[in-house]
């Protein structure tokens, strides 16, 4: 079963706040729904959080073509100018890229989101996914939606981008709606129709008046309470992506990012030092080989080709010893050779001990 919980926009989140929730079976059919405190929410194998649109900001950015891990590191800084927020305090998630090369980015206050996850975890609920409530209305083509509440609401375009707005007491078209439509017109994405969905006891405005003011057709839609049960699209931005999970959850078993960075730095330094040491040893080896060749050429200037100075030097030395009646390696034979020269008449016995040879006539 899957539990979907709708987070309030309150700050800070408190376990005493009433939460709306829906419990689905494996087929996605709603079994139960209610609004209770967190301690009374039923348990389920999968927990999904729906974030209020007022807590999620969207931006379309042209990002560099780098790998996904680099994009995750750059996102908070990429949206810094748009939101005037400290990159360390925001959680940004990148979505798909459109034909113009613009990537959809969703931004949430990191502390608020992590506090919500910890709050659920403290009651044995491990959220696995999180979506903006605007994602439940995405997927149309020039067919936008707006959810109306008492004194505010939010607009949703085809990509699930939400724009929050305040409703005026006089029933005028909210300025945020007019600006959003004008910006879409500049991008070539002007909507043909905007459906208005009422949440709770919210009333619809004068549809004809809003249509004339925005030059876009506004129509009455469905009840938001029913639309809020729809599954999120597969390409919806998962706002819990890369969010640190409390101890005991799946994500907490992963090595912290700082530790991974430290391990990578250590590995890089180790490889660098190994490479430098190998280069130093190779340079010393080359110098020794060059010295060997120089000594060999000094001793044997007639040599034309030097392949292995050490081996060739040993062979030439052995040849010189043999040519002068000296054994190349065996000291006993060398002393015996000298004794034979000193006693041409011959010796009856030889005694060899401790490297000393004695010849007795």
Image: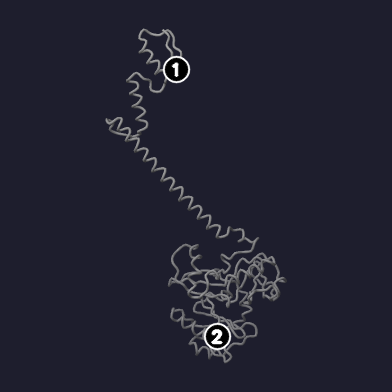
243 relative position to 306: left or right: right
Label 2 neighbourhood size at 10 Å, few (<14), some (14-19), many (20+)? some
338 relative position to 121: left or right: left
355 relative position to 91: left or right: left
Q: CA distance from mark 2 to mark 1?
A: 119 Å
Is the Cβ of the residue at disc 2 closer than 8 Å to that at disc 1? no
From the top left corner, tell me how far across and down residue 42 is, in percent. 71, 69
From the top left corner, tell me how far across and down residue 49 is, in percent. 62, 71
Label 1 neighbourhood size at 10 Å, few (<14), some (14-19), many (20+)? few
Q: Quadrant of residue 336?
A: top left
Q: Quadrant of residue 252?
A: bottom right
From the top left corner, tell me how far across and down residue 105 is, in percent. 51, 71
Compare residues 334 and 176 and report the one nearer the observer. 334
According to the picture, the residue beneath numbered tag 1 turns out to be 356
Quadrant position of the C terminus in the picture: top left
Compare residues 192 and 174 and report the one nearer the observer. 174
137 relative position to 308: left or right: right
For residue 219, the mark is 2
Residue sitting at 65 percent across and 72 percent down? Answer: 5
């Amino acid at each position: 079963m899957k539990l979907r919980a709708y987070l309030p926009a309150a700050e800070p989140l408190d376990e005493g706040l009433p939460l709306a929730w829906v419990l689905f079976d494996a087929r996605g059919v709603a079994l139960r729904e209610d609004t209770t405190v967190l301690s009374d929410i039923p348990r389920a194998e999968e927990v999904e959080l729906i974030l209020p649109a007022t807590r999620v900001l969207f931006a379309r950015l042209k990002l560099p073509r780098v790998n996904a891990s680099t994009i995750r590191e750059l996102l908070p800084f990429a949206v810094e100018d748009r939101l005037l927020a400290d990159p360390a305090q925001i959680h940004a998630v990148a979505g798909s890229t459109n034909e113009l090369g613009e990537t959809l980015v969703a931004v949430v206050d990191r502390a608020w989101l992590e506090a919500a996850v910890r709050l659920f975890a403290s009651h044995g609920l491990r959220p696995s996914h999180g979506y903006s409530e605007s994602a439940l209305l995405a997927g149309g083509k020039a067919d936008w939606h707006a959810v109306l509440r008492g004194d505010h609401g939010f607009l949703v375009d085809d990509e699930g981008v939400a724009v929050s707005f305040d409703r005026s007491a006089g029933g005028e078209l909210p300025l945020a709606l007019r600006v959003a439509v004008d910006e879409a017109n500049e991008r070539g994405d002007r909507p043909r129709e905007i459906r208005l969905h009422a949440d709770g006891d919210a009333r619809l405005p004068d549809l004809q008046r809003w249509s004339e003011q925005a030059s876009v057709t506004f129509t009455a839609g469905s009840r938001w309470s029913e639309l809020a049960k729809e599954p999120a699209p597969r390409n919806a931005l998962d706002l819990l992506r890369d969010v640190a999970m409390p101890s005991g959850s799946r994500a907490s078993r992963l090595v912290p990012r700082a530790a991974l960075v430290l391990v990578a730095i250590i590995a890089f330094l180790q490889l660098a030092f190994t490479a430098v040491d190998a280069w130093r040893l190779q340079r010393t080896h080359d110098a020794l080989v060059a010295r060997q060749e120089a000594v060999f050429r000094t001793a044997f200037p007639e040599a034309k080709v030097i392949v292995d100075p050490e081996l060739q030097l040993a062979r030439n030395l052995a040849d010189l010893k043999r040519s002068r009646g000296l054994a190349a390696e065996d000291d006993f034979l060398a002393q015996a050779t000298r004794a034979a020269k000193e006693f041409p008449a011959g010796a009856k016995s030889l005694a060899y001990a401790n490297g000393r040879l004695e010849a007795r006539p």
